[in-house]
Image (tube, rainbow, N blue to C red):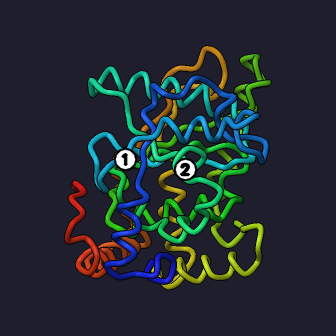
Amino acid sequence: LAALSGGGEKALARAQAAFRLLPFDKLTGADELPGGGTAGGAGGAGDALRERVVAASLGAESSVFVSHSWHDSRQGKWAVLKRWAERDTAERGTAPLLWLDAACVAPEDAGALELLPLLVSGCQRFLILAGPTYTNRLWCVVELFCFLKNGGDIDRVTVLPVVEASNDTDEAAADATRALQRELGRFRVERARCSQERDTQKLLGCIEAGFGKYESFNQVVRRIFSGRSSSGFGVAGLRMPFELEPPAMDEQLRHAAQVIQRHARRFIGRLSGDVSRETS
C-alpha cells in the first residue's frame, strides 16, 4: 500500500485535500455514469458531475466507495445503484455520499490515483457494481484489496451484480445472471489486467506481498462474490440485491484475515492519526 500511495504524512494530507463525495441524489440517470469504456454523457457531463461533489473528511458518515468497471453497461449499473441507494436512504434517513471516480477525480488530477489506498479507506463502506468485465479489470480488484487491507471488514462490502439492460426478459436475465455468477465464482486475480502491463505487474506484486500468495486473496474475493442472491439483476422487475454476511473463515480465509489485520495495524498506525474512520 505504501508503494501505491507514496506513504507518509504528505500522502495523507494530499488525500484529505482531494477527498470529495457525490450525494446520490445529485445523480440524475444512467447517462451520467461511465460505461462501454467511456465516461458518462457528452458535452462536459463530467465537469457537471464534478460541480456537484462536496468536500468531506476522510471517514465521513454515509461515505461509500463505488467500485465498478467502465466497460460494463451504464444502464445496468444505474438500475441496481438506484434501487440500492433508495433503500439505503430509507433505512438511514440520508442519501449515501458516493466516491465515484467520474465525479471525484478530474482528468487533470490523474495523480490522485496514487492516493487510492487512502481514498478507499476514507470511506466507511464499499459498494461493488459487479458486471461481466469487473473481475478482469485489475484496478477494480485493487480497490477491493485496498479496502480489506486497510482494515475494512468484509461485512461492509455490498455486491450489486449487473447484467446488460438489454436482457429485458425473465429468461434472458436469468441466463445472464447465472453466467455472471459463474464468472465471479471463478475469480482469479492473476487473470486481471490493466491497460499497461507495467501497472499490472506492480499491482499484482502488491497483492502478492500483502497476502503471501494469490490464492489467499482469491479465496476472500470468491467468498465475497458468493453471497446469497434473491433476484435477477440489473433489469426491470428485480428484487433486492444480496448483501454479505461476515463469512466463517476456513483455513485460507483465516490466514488472509491475519495478514489483513497485521498490515492494517502497521499502515494505520503510521498514517491515520487524523483519520476517524469507524471500524467494527
Q: Amino acid at mark 2?
A: Ser
Position of residue 250 in the picture relative to residue 230 (left or right)? left
* Image height of 153 relative to 208, above or below: above
Q: Which residue is mark 1?
A: 55
Quarter holding the N terminus? bottom left
Q: Which residue is mark 2?
A: 67
* Image height of 247 relative to 5, above or below: above
Local crowd size for mark 1, using a 10 Å CA cut-off: few (<14), some (14–19), many (≥20): few
Local crowd size for mark 2, using a 10 Å CA cut-off: few (<14), some (14–19), many (≥20): many
Give the percent coordinates (x, y) of residue 116: 49, 65
The residue drawn where x is 40% and y is 81% is 7
Q: Which mark is residue 94?
A: none
Element at label 2: strand
Are the residues flagged by discs 1 and 2 in contact, CB closer than 8 Å? no
Give the percent coordinates (x, y) of residue 180: 69, 42
Give the percent coordinates (x, y) of residue 112: 53, 65
The residue drawn where x is 61% and y is 29% is 78
The number of numbered badges drawn on the structure is 2
Going from the N terminus, do you reach mark 1 or mark 2 first? 1
The residue drawn where x is 66% and y is 51% is 134
* Image height of 101 relative to 116, above or below: above
Q: Amino acid at mark 1?
A: Ala
Which residue is more in the foreground, 183 or 131?
131
